[in-house]
Image (cartoon, rainbow, N blue to C red):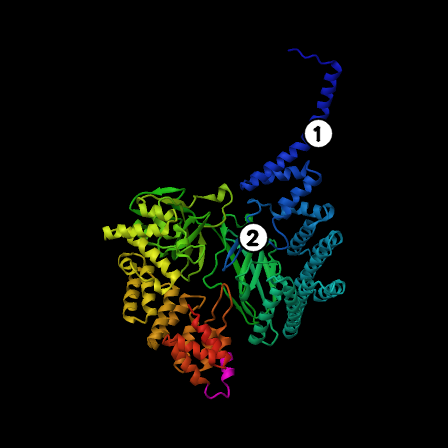
Amino acid sequence: MKIKVKIKHIIAAFLSLLILVPLSIFLIVPQLQLYMGGEQLAAGKENGKQTILKALEGTAVGEQRWDTIRKHMIDDTANGIFEVYVGPSFTTVDVSDEKAGFTFEEKLPFLQEYVEKGPADFYLRTAAAQLAGYYFTEGEVQAAMDVLQQGEKRVPASWEKAELQLYRAKLLIRDHKLTEAQELLKYMKAEAEQEESDLHGEIALLEAEILLGNNNLAAATELVSNIKEKLETEYQEQKEEDDEEWTPAVLEQLRSLHQHLQKALKINNTNTFSTIKGRIVRSDGTPVSHAGVFLREEQVVHRSVTPGDQYQVFTDSNGNFTIASVIPGAYQIYLGLSFEQIDGWTYPIPADPWIDLDGTPAEDINIVLQPLMDLNYPVNQEAVSESEISFAWEKVKGAAYYDISVGVEMNGGSITSPLFTKIRDNELTVPLEELYDKRLGYVSENADWKSVAPESIIAFTNTEDRFSWSVEAFNSEGDLITRSNGYRLDEKTMGNLPFFYLKERSMSEADRLLLDKKIQKAYDKYKEDYEKDAEDKSSLRMLARLKGWERSVKGESAGDSYLEAWAEVSTNADDAFDLAEQYAKKRDWKNYQRWYEIYKTREKALSEYVAGYHAGVLMKQGKVTEAREAFQMAMKLDPHHRFIGSWLALELSTGKSFEEAENLAKQYPQREFGGKSKNWADFISNMAEEAEEDHSYQLELQEALGLYLNDDIEKLQKLLNNTEREHLKTFLSEVREVR
């Protein structure tokens, strides 16, 4: 078919192409560049950054430009919020951002552009705060103040303006310009609406910091106490009105600070404070600049790091940091890092990560990031089909021993368990049967024994599951040097993948039933197979685990069938100690000792938990000297001193004074990574005050301790219910919770 087209139409079409092609390049190419750059970033590819930078430096305009800056420059960090937080208690990662973030130097011109010309939105506030933090760490204090004031003028909402003003006050305090900071806060209070309780609380937190900077601990405590009580009343009324259970972050911060200040007053009422200085570098000497450093008090270390943390600074271009006016107490150091800063490196946490401050000058705290270790085998999803498995890894200079952990995948996640400890060489070969005997913790959705995750029961005997492993290197003092698991975000740092399969055995019909979550049918089939063949170790292993899980759900009444038979043939020390614990609860000391000795023959070194538990058993047998020595060993093994309460009960039961017990509690303070902190020195001190002029106090205390040591729980509870001595009741109640 022929088509006739008039010449003028051809010319018009040609002209339209001449016009449209440049427009298409102008509009479509940046969009493709940005899309491809984002995809490359998400895949962790360095060239993704260059693609986006090229588009921003060239043709990206309008809303597309601002959206790109928001997504790739501002979302990464905000007012001290980093992609990775790492500390002794936990590590958190912001997985929402691309894995190959931009350096601050790369983001700097675009952040400045957004503050000066970008949309007046929430991101403007964040960009201004980021810039101010950067300028401040570089010593450009006035530039930091200028960018915050510039942001204050442009942000649309009053609360955003207030947040920038609060940040400005915080930076003034860190710059020791306390009078200027106080004037700014005074202005903010005058401008704030009465109902803005959160803002008044935030202002009070900074005013308290100023008082602390002026060495006025008592006044800071009074200020925080007053505003805390005011906010608690307001929020209680609000909760009753809304019928909702929630606690605002600022109130949590006030409560935490108030508790900390009260404790500091008790420790040291001379209004003396500490200054902590330090430096963060990599082992090759490269400084880690613009990292976050968070000094976190004991009562908040189990919570996520937030911009509201009291002690937080940034490292300068040489990696240096200074935290001033720190009130007495126990602290841990947390770091805030970008993916780029942590890629291929790890923060080696010391065995005892606590920093105890009493107002005297603190030593410099220098943190050296170490390169991640390389794994040699098994790696890259290797299938192990022999009767033994070998692990090998990079030898680390200065390492006295290594620990291996293995992870099991389940339900889209994984559970990791320590596997072998105190390994002196950088390789280990063990029979697969020994690995099969290793247990994981039980994973379940609820307290129904049939709801257990099968993967957590079958563990390393599952030929269909993929396993991962990692290794940590320690020096002779027990301090971590480095590890294999960490952030490996590009081809240079990726290394071998720590995955492998175990294909030596064949799955039984009972195994299949278990993996299909037919728990009762699986149990019955294992039982049938074992009764047919008493040498069927695999079936006995699973019967013991299922019975152990049932026992933990249903309690002692669940019985202990198969547990003792399995513990006799298992290579796992934990199986023997489980039985030892059961006999200890029955006060069957002969059988306890038998299984404890079996545990020791299978375990190369006592765990900190077993050491403390055994000390408690010796105490309840009346073996005072042996128990005292065992408790002392447990304290050395366990930097958290979880069994100190039991040791204190022993000493008080033998007639030691409150003063002697309090000194022991101060020597071995119990450290809590979560939940309510237990200050045993305070418990003892409170009892000492309560016992003054009370001549029968010691009689009741000794009676209560005797009931505790004899496990006469019913009579002890009756005594505690009837006593009017509240601090005695508190102490004994806490002792009963020691585990």
Where residue 596 appears, as percent x and y from the top left, is: 30, 65
Mark 1 or 2, nearer chain start:
1
Which amino acid lies under the numbered mark 1 shown in the image of this protein? Answer: Leu
Question: Residue tagged by mark 1?
Answer: 23
Q: Is residue 584 left or right of residue 191?
A: left
Residue at the location (37% across, 67% down)?
Answer: 611
- Seen from the viewer's position, the closer of residues 476 and 567 is 567
| Picture quarter with the C terminus | bottom left
> Of helix, strand and loop, which one carries label 2?
strand
Dot 1 and dot 2 residues touching (CB under 8 Å):
no
Which segment is the magenta one? 685-696
Q: Is residue 397 visible?
A: no
- Seen from the viewer's position, the closer of residues 333 and 435 is 435
Residue 689 belongs to magenta span: yes
Residue at the location (53% across, 60% down)?
Answer: 366
Residue 667 belongs to magenta span: no
Which amino acid lies under the numbered mark 2 shown in the image of this protein? Answer: Leu
Where residue 15 appears, as percent x and y from the top left, is: 74, 21
Q: Is residue 171 left or right of residue 684?
A: right
- Seen from the viewer's position, the closer of residues 31 and 134 is 31
Q: Name the mark on residue 487.
A: none
Q: How many marks?
A: 2
Where residue 619 appears, as percent x and y from the top left, is: 36, 74
Where residue 355 appears, as percent x and y from the top left, is: 52, 66
User: Relative to 715, does residue 553 appear above or below in the rendering?
Assistant: above
Question: Residue tagged by mark 2?
Answer: 337
Q: Quadrant of residue 295?
A: bottom right
Cα gap from disc 1 to disc 2, whole angstroms? 42 Å
User: Relative to 248, does residue 343 appear above or below in the rendering?
Assistant: above
> Of helix, strand and loop, which one carries label 1?
helix
Residue at the location (45% across, 76% down)?
Answer: 732
